[in-house]
Image (cartoon, rainbow, N blue to C red):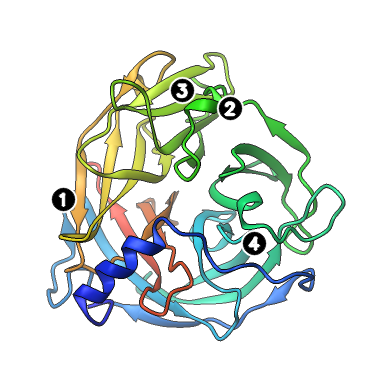
Amino acid sequence: MIFSGRRARRTLFACVLTCASPAIAAQRAPVEAVEISARPITQFHTGHDQTRFGPFEFVGGLEMTSPARDFGALSALRFLKPGSDFIGVADTGFWFFGTIAHDAGKRPSGVKNFRMQQMVDASGRPIDRKWKVDAEGLAVKDGIATVGFERDQRVTQFKIDPDNMKAPIRQLDYLVPAQELRQNRGFETVTHAHPYGQHAGGLVVVSERSLDKAGNVYAAIIEGPHKGVFTVKRNGDFDITDGAFLPDGDLLLLERSFSIARGVKMRLRRIYGESVEKGAVADGPVLMEADLGYQIDNMEGLDVWTRDDGALMVSLVSDDNHSILQHDLYLEFILHQD
């Protein structure tokens, strides 16, 4: 099991999924090297050796720990080099960079060269107010990082420089009426559409749980030839925490559910690409669901990439909310298309 004490976990999640993280200390060094210890995860279903879960095949994972105060609260991760070098954002207002190492069996074996840097304002000064830097969603393309922020709702772009992330270079119009975005349920998914699909690689944003009158989740295509607002059909009591487009043009969503009675759950859902269009209600099937009997936590980040042998890979990362009862997890799956 990931935690000790099911009741303690449920009580904790009731707070950490709705409360702000600890205050951010001021005036950090520009880039902080962080020591990461990584314990391999060899079973996804605790106590069971099965590796197939619907179309997903579990490859392996890591439980990451660090003595560094700022490590944790990992909200989103995108690879700069498939399955290796990555960039990410923490909802406490930090950038993070590093490299996932793999063993001879192509299983994740460790994290190397992990660094963190505090986000800065237009003047280059570290931002210490949590509500200004609640970074949740991330997309990368052509050296530009696009970040979705909650509370102070915005979609913002930055030039990627792992050695010195500077002030934002532009704000984007996210099209969804601002009054429709719930303060702590804004854009958790920021991703580029398929480059050769109907949206020509344009940015797509999906909120966590900002609902229209029909109970569907607000989303928008904010770039490309067919810009406009759409919604995603809400399926049960799950909220959307991240997403990425698959090579066939479908949108893979990571979703999370929590209740005192059932604890936390994770789900992966495939949204049909043709339903992602202006004015539509996008929908698609659930591919996998897991509860605390599996090696999950507060799963918040997802990326899709292709391994050097051609396997279509899905990586997930969790947000520990800087709690001693939660964990920072990295998980890898092959998504079989047959």
Q: Nearer the viewer, residue 241 or 99?
A: 241
Judging by the rendered image, the residue that carries numbered circle 1 is: 54
Horizontally, is 16 left or right of 75 in the view? left
Contact between labelled residues 2 and 3, with CB atoms less than 8 Å apart: no
**Residue 59 in the image, given as x and y percentages of width and height:** 30, 66
Residue 198 in view here: no
**Relative height, residue 176 to residue 136 (above, below):** above
Q: Nearer the viewer, residue 143 or 298?
A: 298
Contact between labelled residues 2 and 4, with CB atoms less than 8 Å apart: no
Could you tell me which secondary element the residue under label 4 belongs to? strand
Marks 1 and 3 sit apart, C-alpha to C-alpha, by 27 Å
Q: Amino acid at mark 3?
A: Gly
Could you tell me which secondary element the residue under label 1 belongs to? loop
Judging by the rendered image, the residue that carries numbered circle 3 is: 197
The numbered disc on residue 94 is 4
Marks 4 and 2 sit apart, C-alpha to C-alpha, by 22 Å
The numbered disc on residue 311 is none
Badge 4 or badge 3: first in the primary sequence: 4
**Relative height, residue 103 to residue 10 (above, below):** below
Could you tell me which secondary element the residue under label 2 belongs to? loop
Residue 45 location, quadrant:
bottom left
Residue 95 in view here: yes
